[in-house]
Image: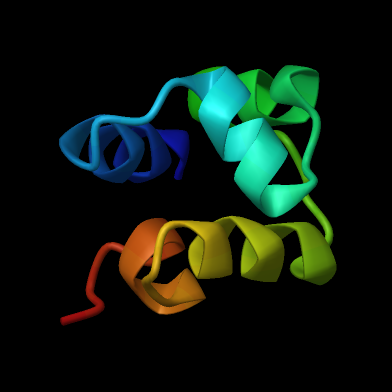
């Protein structure tokens, strides 16, 4: 799950700190999502991250999304 978040964030040239500022999600939470496949993020957190990255939750967190 987290791998695609990191991949998209890095492709946009963003650090975890920049994503934190843009999304309002703490860097610690972003790191936990990127590094822990079992981390259970709330839907609002996922939406905030997707919005900050100008994409959708599906494209970040679901492998079969187009």
> Which quarter of the picture shows residue 21?
top right
In this picture, residue 24 sits left or right of residue 20 = right
- Mark yes or no: residue 37 visible: no
Percent across and percent down for residue 14 are 37, 30
- Mark yes or no: residue 8 visible: yes
Choose between 43 and 14: the one closer to the eye.
Answer: 14
As drawn, 51 above or below 17: below
In this picture, residue 49 sits left or right of residue 66 = right
Residue at image point 24% right, 42% down: 12
In this picture, residue 7 sits left or right of residue 52 = left
Residue at image point 46% right, 36% down: 2
Percent across and percent down for residue 56 are 42, 77
Percent across and percent down for residue 7 are 25, 35
> Which quarter of the picture shows residue 46?
bottom right
Residue at image point 60% right, 20% down: 17
The count of marks equals 0
Colour style of the rendered protein structure: rainbow
Percent across and percent down for residue 45 are 77, 57
Position of the C terminus, as image quadrant, is bottom left
> Which quarter of the picture shows residue 20?
top right
As drawn, 58 above or below 15: below
Residue at image point 51% right, 65% down: 50
In this picture, residue 62 sits left or right of residue 22 = left
Position of the N terminus, as image quadrant, is top left
Choose between 20 and 1: the one closer to the eye.
Answer: 20
As drawn, 28 above or below 58: above
């Amino acid at each position: 799950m987290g791998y695609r978040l990191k991949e998209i964030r890095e492709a946009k040239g963003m650090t975890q700190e920049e994503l934190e500022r843009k999304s309002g999600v703490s860097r610690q939470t972003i790191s936990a999502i990127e590094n822990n496949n079992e981390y259970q993020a709330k839907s609002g957190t996922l939406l905030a991250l997707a919005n900050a990255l100008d994409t959708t939750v599906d494209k970040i967190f679901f492998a079969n999304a187009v």
